[in-house]
């Protein structure tokens, strides 16, 4: 039986969920297998999570697939991850599109091989007519990079007269960040037991609810996801107000 109560589900569900998919390496090491085996298994958990989001009517799922710091890993592990991206795009994009999943990559893609960049562009162009889920894959992404690239675009806007520096505010700045056109981030999940953000969505996390689990990413499934959603549904999001104000609006 699902632990999500269908009566409260709709208005208490997050519209936008982000996940730091951590723990692939440790999952494999515990099985005396190479770390790359964990990444292969992790790709299966990605598919299950996308399906769970579609089922639960989550509108946006943003996944941390490769951080700007992950280039520091051994060359063969980085190579395996790049191969996995290519294969996953080749294998899954058409089916995702047919199921109403619109894909977008966020991050600095200039560092990727041209063949992979082409695949990313093609995947983004296959946007379904009826979007059921916006799937953002963060690849060579860093939260600081996102803020800096927004600042660069704002600076260009000021230089060419499109933006007035005197009226630059949070909403103008926000409009230049990677996920600006999508609903704000509601729920930030990290698997793998670490309680850190690792330079993921720094700007967007400002008022997100945080949820951490020791479950390693390859073991993440619909039941763990539902546990996160159920916990989120119990949270009181006050945005600076008092609980009293929320319960008895003036
Ligand atoms: C997350 O799992 C996947 C990527 C960073 C690409 P890890 O590979 O970080 O797994 P652990 O944290 O070493 O177990
Ligand atoms: C964060 O995990 C990046 C991804 C999940 C893609 P890491 O395993 O790279 O994070 P740290 O190094 O433990 O902070
Ligand atoms: Mg890790």
Image: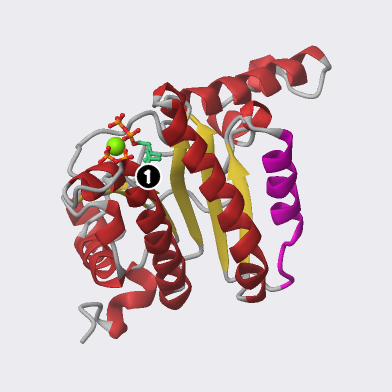
232 relative to 181 in the view: left or right: left
Label 1: which secondary element: helix
For the residue pair 242 and 172, the one nearer the viewer reads as 172
Q: Which residue is mark 1?
A: 36
Seen at 30% across and 47% down, the residue is 24
x then y, percent, for residue 92: 59, 65
178 relative to 27 in the view: left or right: right
What colour scheme governs how the chains and residues are painted in the rendered image of this protein? secondary structure
Seen at 75% across and 52% down, the residue is 122
Asked if the stretch drawn in magenta spans residue 120, the answer is yes
Q: Is mark 1 within 8 Å of ligand 1?
A: no
x then y, percent, for residue 199: 39, 28
Q: Which residue extends farthest bottom?
A: 1
Residue range of the region highlighted in magenta in the rendering: 114-129
Asked if the stretch drawn in magenta spans residue 122, the answer is yes
For the residue pair 230 and 248, the one nearer the viewer reads as 230
Q: State the predominant SS element of the stretch in magenta.
A: helix
């Amino acid at each position: 039986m699902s632990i999500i109560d269908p009566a409260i589900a709709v208005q208490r569900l997050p519209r936008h969920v982000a996940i730091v998919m951590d723990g692939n390496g440790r999952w494999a090491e515990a099985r005396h297998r190479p770390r790359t085996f964990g990444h292969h298994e992790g790709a299966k958990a990605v598919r299950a999570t996308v399906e769970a989001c579609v089922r639960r009517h989550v509108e946006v799922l943003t996944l941390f697939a490769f951080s700007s710091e992950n280039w520091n890993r051994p060359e063969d592990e980085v190579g395996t991850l790049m191969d996995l991206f290519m294969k996953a795009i080749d294998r899954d994009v058409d089916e995702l599109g047919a199921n109403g999943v619109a894909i977008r990559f966020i991050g600095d893609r200039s560092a990727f091989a041209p063949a992979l960049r082409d695949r990313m562009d093609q995947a983004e162009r296959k946007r379904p007519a009826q979007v059921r889920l916006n799937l953002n894959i963060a690849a060579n992404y860093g939260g600081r990079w996102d803020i800096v690239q927004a600042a660069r675009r704002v600076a260009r806007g000021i230089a060419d007269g499109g933006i007035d520096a005197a009226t630059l505010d949070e909403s103008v700045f926000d409009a230049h960040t990677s996920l600006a056109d999508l609903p704000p981030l509601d729920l930030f999940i990290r698997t793998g037991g670490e309680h850190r953000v690792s330079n993921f969505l720094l700007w967007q996390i400002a008022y997100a609810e945080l949820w951490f689990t020791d479950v390693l990413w390859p073991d993440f499934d619909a039941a763990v996801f539902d546990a996160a959603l159920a916990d989120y549904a119990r949270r009181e999001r006050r945005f600076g107000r008092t609980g009293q104000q929320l319960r008895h609006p003036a």
